[in-house]
Image (cartoon, rainbow, N blue to C red):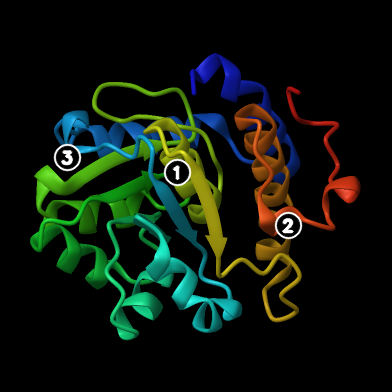
Amino acid sequence: MEFSTWEPAYEAILADFGYDRTDDEDARDALAELVEPFDHSRVDFVGECVAVAGAGPSLAAETDRAAAADIVVAASTAVDTLRSQGIDVDWMVTDLDKNPETARELTEAGTPVAAHAHGDNVAAVRELVPTFDDGQVLPTTQADPAGPVENFGGFTDGDRAAFLADHFGAAELVFVGWDFDDPDVSDAKRRKLVWAERLLYWLERGRGEQFGVLDGRRTAVDVSALPL
């Protein structure tokens, strides 16, 4: 996704949450100082069914669907749940806030990690990213891409995983471990899940595909802030 396409949604997110764009840009620049450009020739999702694993409570009951996919891209702690069931993860997407030791282990084992910088995690970026195998780190931002830091679209770890898979040519996206109505999440997380749902709706429209995770929910999605 070109940043010019993503930017209207990004600006709506900034306005909704009261985030400062400059903070995101500062985080992006901090990440850029620590990494080299990721080798895109290593990534080929073309023609593949990609499982996009969220870290919701339903994941434990849906691991078989992840195992049946050609490629598994997992958000944050979804990696730990899948690995505990013997399911290999091909990519991890994280903003470094929960299980950085898992990200480190994956990079050391040769599994790529899309490490995300935003205004609230500069300290984590500076502390943790240097401990990863640099060649396995795909650096991302939600602001303008700059230097080695890229932006494929998306806001939360989960929907960024979907946008990443789309960018690299996935033929089909299958969603596991997604719980938009999880009653146990914080108010802040619930607001982020609202945006994740909106962004997946936008993505499926662009792909000409219907994601099962949105079945029964589409008519209630507020699209007013989306550049449809």
Residue type marked 3: Leu
Amino acid under disc 1: His
Quarter of the image with the C terminus in it: top right
Q: Tell me the residue that label 1 is attached to.
A: 118
**197 on left or right of 165:** right
Mark-to-mark CA distance, 2 and 1: 17 Å
The part of the image, by quadrant, that contains residue 92 is bottom left
Nearer to us of marks 3 and 2 is 2
- Pair 2/1: label in front: 2
Q: Nearer the viewer, residue 77 or 62?
A: 62
The residue wearing badge 2 is 191
Is 20 rendered above or below residue 77? above
CA gap, disc 3 to disc 1? Answer: 15 Å
From mark 3 to mark 2, how far is it between C-alphas? 31 Å
Judge whether 174 appears above or below 17 on screen: below
Residue for point 70% across, 48% down = 195
Q: Position of residue 201 (x, y in %)?
A: 71, 41
Determine whether the residue tagged by mark 2 lies in a helix, strand or loop: helix
The residue pinned by badge 3 equals: 34
Confirm whether residue 52 shows in the render: yes
Residue 116 in percent (x, y) is at 38, 46
Q: Hey, which quadrant is residue 180 in on the image? A: bottom right
